[in-house]
Amino acid sequence: MTPTDAQGLRLSLEAEGIHTLLVQFTDLQGVAKGKLLPLHQLETLLNEGAGFAGPSICGTGLGRTGARSEYYARGDASTLRALPWLPGVARIVGDGFVDGQPFDACPRQVLRRQVARLAERGWRLRLGIEPEFFLLRRDAATGHWGPADPTDRLDKPSYDLKALPRQLGFLQALRGALEDAGLTVLQLDHEDAHGQYEVNFAHDEALASCDHLMLFKLAAHTLAERAGCVFSMMPKPFANQPGSGLHFHVSLWPTDPGDSDALGDDELRPFMAGVLAHSAGLCALAAPTVNSYKRLVVGESLSGTSWAPAFVAHGPNNRSALLRTLPGRFEWRLPDASANPYLAAAGLIAAGLDGIDRRLDPGPACTDDLFDLPLAKIRARGIAPLPQSLAEACDALAADSVLATALGSTLQQQFLALKRDEALAYARHVSTWELERYAALF
């Protein structure tokens, strides 16, 4: 950006009462990171970026010395948004740069590369991301976690209009903050677990939708803390209740602005087939914690209804399948609330394009409720299960050359090392359940 353009943008922000920039990037774990800069640093931020110690950021693999030890978050001017919950502050999303070049292990740069592959074919991908989340409190005396609303106890709490008004202050503050920051909020509801809610935004271009999700998380964390509770995107905090998904509504569109219709089945079906074919490796990106696999359960769930897919299948409006097909789009139901949206979206595009390149067919649609079908019948139909542990999903990702190419060698190595350490630490942990079951048994 030229000095003149930057000066004009700075003056416009000053006129809005902005005095501080919050430059935000997303680390490997999907956590928002960043720092505050005075507004007069806008030109530097847009052209060079804000500097960070590379080794201090999860998943960069950067050293402590030399030109490649410094990580720069270079501001994307199109993402500038005033933050109503932080008066005088505007967020700007940063792309990772190292030694003057786009950083291959920046999750947003990974997604940019896949978006560019679509654009080369004259296509773009639009996403509607649906975050589910919990509002929790931790008991100071016992250390136990529970719903922020202790009276939220219905056996079937979906769409509960008794509990919903009790959190109306937080939910309305969240909706107002997001809309004032430029997002279109479509609806808010109480989900199928105690203390669980969902917010839906309007769909947008893939990169913008992921940016919107990170903005949502920034707002929700701050506003929940002010309300005296904890905003949680842990996939499954309670064993006997459903977990939180991060469903992606996916559609393909031409890049030509004169063509206002989504692409049809000729492109969408092989794209879906690619997503199904790479679902095991995608699982590591879309369900990236050990807790994720308490949600993706083969067989009967403790909660009765998990709403989470366990099998690789697609079907018309079928919420028990991995892909729920709808007119002109499909819903990818694998991602959970802990997923890094940029990596999940990048993997989705890479898998879909592989399906198109190989002219894959997704196979027959499944119209049965897979939650009700006996496992023997599912196996007899050749419907594969999703990985049932983080370790299994990591092995699948390591073996998937298409996803490896999409992620790049640095990020894939960092991701697998981090997640395998997590799986190993979990496997070695001795839980209260184990002590209660085994300590006096033998």
Image (tube, rainbow, N blue to C red):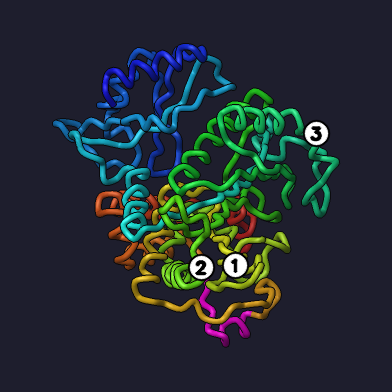
Q: Which of the two discs, 3 and 2, sits closer to the camera?
A: 2
Q: Which of the two discs, 3 and 1, sits closer to the camera?
A: 1
Q: In which quarter of the view is residue 166 placed?
A: top right
Q: Amino acid at mark 2?
A: Gly
Q: Which mark is residue 366?
A: none
Task: In the rendered view, tell whether residue 313 sits above or below residue 351.
Answer: below
Farthest residue toward the bottom?
380
Q: Look at mark 1 in the image and give the residue it sits on.
A: 325
As measured in the structure, the alpha-carbon distance from the residue carrying label 3 to the one carrying label 1 is 35 Å
Question: In terms of secondary structure, where does tag 2 sit?
Answer: loop
Residue drawn at the location 25% of the way across and 50% of the way down: 410
As measured in the structure, the alpha-carbon distance from the residue carrying label 3 to the one carrying label 2 is 43 Å
Farthest residue toward the right?
162
Pointer 3 local density, CA inside 10 Å: few below 14, some 14–19, many at least 20: few
Near-viewer residue (24 or 29): 24
Q: Look at mark 3 in the image and give the residue it sits on.
A: 166
Part of the protein shown in magenta = 375-385
Q: Which of the two discs, 2 and 1, sits closer to the camera?
A: 2
